[in-house]
Amino acid sequence: MEVNARKIIGAVLALTAATAAFAKPRKINVAHTITNVPYDFLDAKGKADGFEIAVLKAVDALLPQYQFVFHGVSDEELLIGTESGKYQVGTKGAWITEERAKKFIIPSQPLAASVIGIAFRAENANQISDLESFARFSGKLIPISPQSAQYSVIADYNAKNPGNQIKLVPSDVFDIADSYLWVLEGRYDAYFVLKLSYEKNVLAEDGPYHQFADRLAYVPYKGIPTWPLFNKKEAQLAEDYDKAVQQLKENGTISALSQKYFGEDVFTFVTD
């Protein structure tokens, strides 16, 4: 009887331990950039903040089997660490590129969106109201680096509009510091730039080009979805993320968070 009792107690203890191990959430290390306001950044207390962070925290709340732990890192560390498996997820306001699609799992549901459009001379506002009218006006766009995701956006536009082309000139540098000045000088007629960047650099009172705010105008073209990058071994995690994000879209959480961090629902600009 004593032997049987020991066996029963041992089996119960083993089952209890197994149940506890099963119930313990799996730690998910999420790498994020630290200065990409309002997407991913560290607040004044050094804590992770931003729209993408807030959405991932809401995702975490819907997935009790996981515990997300956030790590603020550099762009390079994020990409290398996520690819190697040091981090299971990396988020940096990333657009999809062929290279990223090869190195990471890209989920079905985007995490956020970047609104992009053209900045041009305000004096031409009666002639330029969108990308199509700009192409008819002149199509003279500030050169774009072929390594930039913006380049492929314009290339895609040109492919869809063979009779109304934008002059897509490759640049040998990723960012041309004098782009706004080149537009004002008339060397080019528009600068393809993120809406947030235009707001920070031109519209904001402390922006470096605020003195030209009355001489420049801006119209958005479209919203480009941004995605979290999952390590190649995290297919189940990516699938669970997709289900949670769909639920957050349906219950209005993502729209509310977008209003909080961007002042508008950026997904209304995503047209395809």
Image (spheres, rainbow, N blue to C red):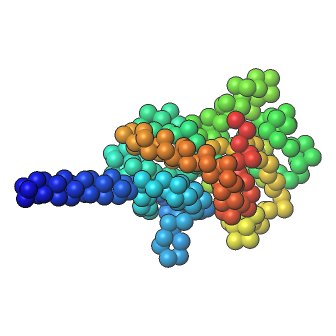
Q: Quadrant of residue 253?
A: bottom right
For the residue pair 38 and 181, the one nearer the viewer reads as 38
Q: Is residue 129 left or right of residue 103?
A: right
- Residue ID at (26%, 57%): 16
Q: What residue sits 49% from the left and 56% below the top? A: 60
Q: Residue at x 60, y 59 (%)?
A: 51
Res 200 seen here = no
Q: Position of residue 268 (x, y in %)?
A: 75, 47
**Residue 255 placed where, x, y %?**
70, 55
Q: Residue furthest bottom?
A: 45
Q: Residue furthest top?
A: 162
Q: Is residue 57 visible?
A: yes
Q: Residue furthest front?
A: 1
In this rendered view, identify the residue nearer to me: 134 or 111. 111
Which one is in front, 111 or 128?
111
Q: Measuring 33% from the left and 52% from the top, which residue is drawn there?
A: 22
Of all residues, the one furthest to the right in this rendering is 126
Say which quadrant the C terminus sits in.
top right
Q: Position of residue 87 (x, y in %)?
A: 37, 52
